[in-house]
Every structure is written in C-alpha cells, then in structure tokens.
Amino acid sequence: MEQLSGLLRRLRRQLESPISVGGGFRQISLPVPASLAATLLEWLAAQPAFPQFYWLHRDGHEEAAACGALRLFTQPEQAQAFIRAHQGVRIWGLNAFDGTAHLFLPRLEMLSREGEAQLTLNLFSESSLRDDADAADRWLEKVVAARPIAPLKAKVNKVQHQPARAGWEIMLQEALKAIDRQQMEKVVLARSTLLTLNGPLSAPAMMDASRRVNHRCYHFMLRFDAHSAFLGSSPERLYRRNGLQLLTEALAGTVANHPDQQRAQALAQWLQGDAKNRHENLLVVDDICQRLQGGADSLDVLPPEVVRLRKVQHLRRRIEGQLNHADDADCLQRLQPTAAVAGLPRQAAREFILQHEPFSRGWYAGSAGYLSSSLSEFCVALRCAQLEEEGLRLYAGAGIVAGSDAAEEWQEVENKAAGLLTLLQPGYSE
C-alpha cells in the first residue's frame, strides 16, 4: 500500500503546480515499482471507477489496466482525430461487429511493457485544465490498493444455446445452399450460449482464471460497471501497427487439441494437410490481401503454422506489410470483420448472418485493444463472454464452406466455447 500511496502523493503534488486556466490536454507519468506492476488486474478489480479496461498481450510482453473515462468515442474515426490533436494519448476499448465502438481515454492508466511500467494520469478539458486538475485530485482520493481476486465460485445451473442443435443444422444447411448457389464462398456461423449461474460472477475472477490456463491468447476485459462486462481470451490478432509497419494474420482452420502430446501432434499434422481447412485459411489470406490493396504495399505472407491452444488448434498464416499512411480507422475499416469471423464475400456473408443468426453479435467478432499515434494493436474478439444480469453469455463460431458437416461444425463450436465454459466446471486444468 505504501508504494501506491507514494505514487498518488507525487501525482497530487504535481497537480498543485501551475496549470493553464484554459482548455487543453496534459499527462503526468511516473515509474511504477515491479511489485505493483505485477498486480495490474488485482489493482484494477479493486477500483470503484468505471469503465475499466484490462489487456494482456498474447506474447506476455505488454499488460495494461486503465480506468475512468475522460472522453468516450463511439467511432474509431473520433478517437483517431483526438489522438492526432493530442500527442501521447492511448485510447482503449472495443469495436463491435457492426462497427460501433466503446473507446475511451482513461483518467488513470498503468502500463507494463518489456519489464518497465509506468502510471499515467490524463488531464483534459475543453474549457479549463485547472478545473480538470482539481477534479483529478478529488478522483485520486478514491483510488485504492490492489486486493487478491477471489477464486471463481459460480457454477452453471442451466445452459441455453441460440440456436439449439436442431436450429444450428437448419442454419448450416441454408448456408450450404447459398454457397452452392455461389452467393458466397464462406460464412462464419456463430452460437450464443447463456449460462444461468447459481450466484453472482466476478468478471475479474473470470479474467484471472482464463489468463492462468488459456495461454498464447490476448486477454481483454471491458467492465462497463460493477455488474456488466465483456471479456475474452482470443488467439487472433486483427492487426498491429508500429509506425507504418503492419502485422496481421489469417487464423482459420480448426481441429481439437489433446492433452497427450503425440495425439495432439497427429491432429496438428492432419490439420496442416486437410484440404478443407487449408482452403478455408487461404480464403482468409486472399481476402486480407485484397482488402489491404491501396492501403499497404509489399505484403508478405509467411508459411502456415499450427497454433496449439488449450482446447483447439488453429492453422495460421502471418501477413506483413508497409502501410501508406498511419491510419488506424482505415485499418479497422479494411480488416474488420475478417473473413475468419464473417465470410466471403464480406457483405453477402454479413447479410446472411443478419438474416439467419437468432441473436445480435454485439462485441463478439469485433475487436479489442488500443490506438495511439505510434503504436496500435487490436485482437479479434473471440472466445469471449458477456456478463449480464441473467448470467454469462458465451460466443463461438465456425467457418462454413462447401463440404462442411453440421455435426463436425457443432463440435468445433463446442470445443471453442470450452475455453471459457470449463473454467466454471469443477477441477478445470490446462
């Protein structure tokens, strides 16, 4: 507690220094001790301020916790315009499947990267920066120290799928007919699963349990308030922009994982050689490359590799390129939703999804991450869940192409949903 108290005292002393009486933007940043940087999720979970955003990079080199909102943006273009006007800003949040957003400039952010961490207090006002500094001083009085996150206790009483198994088979057959009529080459069909629980569920506890076992994933959580959150552990990068350098990927093609190393390797070899899965992956590669035409040059598609996760394995091809402009709103417009979560052609697939899926995707299959002037990164919002008053709603999908089998695709969705569902079952493990 002394370490956090000391940082807060230093922040508040700086707020007492002369500050412009006019409007403007200012940041106050301080280095964070390693012991405090090691408890970012625990610290965030203890705060009374919302919204809250948690981020842990799949490579483990970057972790962040941000809370309080100075500005909210419902479109990426709005956030990008703010960033261009105010250097040093990092904006966090979600982009929905339909393109709307919940992106925010946090009041307070802790960011740990490559072994170094810093605490940043943001000040912003269009009329009086001095007034906002006074407001920030009062806001800091409510910041508290990290507390241990209690283990998950909620258990599942009831499971309701949308669509149910029979409806899934009907929806898939309709998709195959549309593919056969050449209305589209691929469509990704999703299932929503409402878990009715025996008691309240803590979103930070769910996030903590998932990050402990779902390795090689981006972990993200946006808490809108104390009882509503969207969180997930996604293996898929939408894109990373470092200056003009762009990294993206095609993650499509799935097979089950297995605890036994030899059996897992045999499944991976089958995945790499299976014509249907290779075709599905190449469709996504071709779509990404086409969408980036005019926005990026010198695209390089790397050889396929298998990504092994806790419950499933995926076929992945990384794609590298150089952007013509550092334009995140353009990147999001071009790349989201990818063919890996919508289908091909994109508009035809989205229309089919809208007509046939019996629920709204919302944040599912959108993206989660951050924007800044020099570095931006978003993952695809997969293997995710919405915490609601009535319970926890899980989302998972499967890519449908010519030759897809309803039973096999249902099992694929089951395997994907298991990444989070099993956290609520007794004795879950890696």
Image: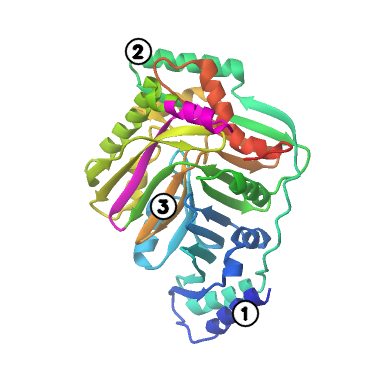
Label 1: which secondary element: helix
Q: CA distance from mark 1 to mark 3?
A: 32 Å
Q: Which residues are magenta?
A: 243-269
Q: CA distance from mark 2 to mark 3?
A: 38 Å
Q: Residues within 10 Å of mark 2 (few under 14, many from 20)?
A: few
- Mark 1 and mark 3 residues within 8 Å of each other at the beta carbon: no
* Percent of width and height locating residue 325: 25, 54
Q: Nearer the viewer, residue 193 or 101?
A: 193
First in sequence: mark 2 or mark 3? 2
* Percent of width and height locating residue 263: 53, 27
* Percent of width and height locating residue 204: 65, 52
First in sequence: mark 1 or mark 3? 1
Q: Amino acid at mark 2?
A: Arg
Residue denoted by label 1: 6
Residue denoted by label 2: 181
Q: Amino acid at mark 3?
A: Glu
Q: Quadrant of the C terminus?
A: top right
Nearer the camera: disc 2 or disc 3? 3
First in sequence: mark 1 or mark 2? 1
Residue 143 inside the magenta-drawn segment = no
Q: CA distance from mark 1 to mark 2?
A: 67 Å
Q: Amino acid at mark 1?
A: Gly
Residue denoted by label 3: 377
